[in-house]
């Protein structure tokens, strides 16, 4: 019978270092052509859509993630892992934790690859699940000394800062503006549902690394073109998915043609990352398809190793 994982199982088994390591392996596999990960597909069903992302690690496994946009409170993501040799279903994960940790892990890889080696301060705009896993993963790759957090709700940002202190043992404080959150920070995370920019690139210090997780299309975006103009290094986890956005991503507009690089290529040493301490680096997260399945496979293997 297939193994079944719910959110508590995923949370108990996947720590930040394991998740970041898995996502590094996934990005390298994608760059090498071993992880086949086409852009997401969607089916309009009247009142909502079903969205599918799929991946195939050649010679080992294939699988998919599905989720909907109907907005039902009980709507959950489903990730299915198939054995690549027999086609049998090896495991199923139900819930949001696997996908959330996957996205955080990709962000952690970007921080590790692109932030300055001496980066110790982080500013985050946003206080939801995606913001949390970004900080959680960043703390696994840099010895954070302080986190500043801003979101629209004073209560939520205070609770978020308290959670960082309690669970990550990192000093954290809530601040009353996005500017206060990002100024003089070594690493900045944008993880909001904002459809207009929450960041003024002029507030960034030289040498800052920025992870962007929220909307980044021409019709809705949590950052503006000023951030792209300020970037000395600009990468994504999936150039193919970035190019497939409709409406287009800001970073794929003609003004930035050829500028958006591949994080996997940086990891493999086939493209330059940060080359100077004062450079601003930006990671535009798209959520490389197949990485949820990659992480589910890692979860299964982890369980087998512990058995």
Image: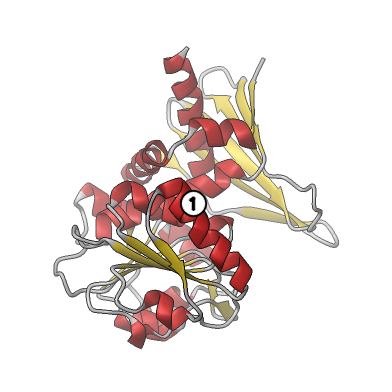
60 or 231: nearer the eye? 231
Instruction: Estimate the x, y position of residue 245 in percent, counting from the top left.
Output: 55, 67
Q: Is residue 124 above or below residue 268?
A: below
Q: Is residue 193 above or below residue 12?
A: below
84 or 193: nearer the eye? 193
**Image check: 263 left or right of 61?**
left
- Taking the spot 18% from the left edge, 75% from the top edge, the residue there is 278
Around disc 1, counting alpha carbons within 10 Å, would you say few (fewer than 14), some (14 to 19), or many (20 or more)? many
Colour mode of the rendering:
secondary structure
Q: Quadrant of residue 114?
A: bottom left
39 or 139: nearer the eye? 139
- Taking the spot 43% from the left edge, 74% from the top edge, the residue there is 252
Q: Quadrant of residue 171?
A: bottom left
* Residue where numbered disc 1 is placed: 103
Instruction: Estimate the x, y position of residue 167 in percent, counting from the top left.
Output: 47, 46
Q: Of all residues shown, which one is farthest toward the right? A: 46
**Image check: 146 left or right of 191?**
left
Q: SS for tag 1?
A: helix
Instruction: Estimate the x, y position of residue 180 in percent, counting from the top left.
Output: 41, 80
Q: Quadrant of residue 220?
A: bottom right
- Taking the spot 52% from the left edge, 76% from the top edge, the residue there is 222
């Amino acid at each position: 019978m297939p193994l079944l994982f719910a959110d508590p199982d995923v949370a108990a088994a996947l720590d930040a270092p394991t998740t970041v390591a898995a996502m590094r392996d996934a990005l390298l596999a994608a760059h090498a052509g071993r992880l086949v990960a086409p852009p997401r597909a969607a089916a309009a069903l009247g009142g909502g859509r079903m969205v599918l992302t799929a991946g195939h690690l050649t010679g080992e496994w294939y699988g998919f993630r599905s989720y909907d946009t109907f907005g039902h409170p009980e709507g959950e993501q489903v990730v299915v892992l198939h054995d690549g040799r027999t086609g049998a279903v090896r495991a199923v994960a139900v819930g949001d934790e696997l996908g959330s940790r996957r996205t955080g892990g990709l962000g952690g890889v970007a921080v590790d690859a692109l932030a300055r080696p001496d980066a110790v301060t982080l500013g985050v705009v946003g206080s939801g699940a995606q913001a949390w896993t970004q900080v959680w993963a960043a703390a696994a790759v840099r010895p954070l000394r302080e986190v500043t957090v801003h979101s629209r709700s004073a209560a939520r940002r205070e609770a978020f800062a308290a959670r960082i202190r309690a669970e990550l043992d990192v000093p954290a404080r809530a601040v009353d503006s996005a500017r206060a959150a990002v100024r003089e920070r070594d690493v900045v995370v944008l993880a909001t549902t904002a459809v207009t920019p929450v960041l003024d690139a002029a507030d960034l210090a030289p040498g800052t690394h920025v992870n962007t997780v929220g909307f980044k299309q021409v019709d809705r975006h949590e950052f503006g073109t000023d951030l792209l103009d300020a970037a000395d290094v600009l990468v994504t986890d999936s150039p193919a998915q970035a190019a497939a956005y409709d409406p287009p991503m800001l970073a794929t507009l003609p003004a930035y043609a050829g500028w958006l690089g591949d994080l996997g290529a940086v990891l493999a040493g086939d493209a330059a990352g940060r080359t100077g301490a004062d450079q601003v680096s930006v990671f535009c997260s798209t959520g490389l398809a197949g990485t949820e399945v990659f992480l589910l496979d890692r979860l299964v293997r982890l369980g087998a190793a512990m058995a």
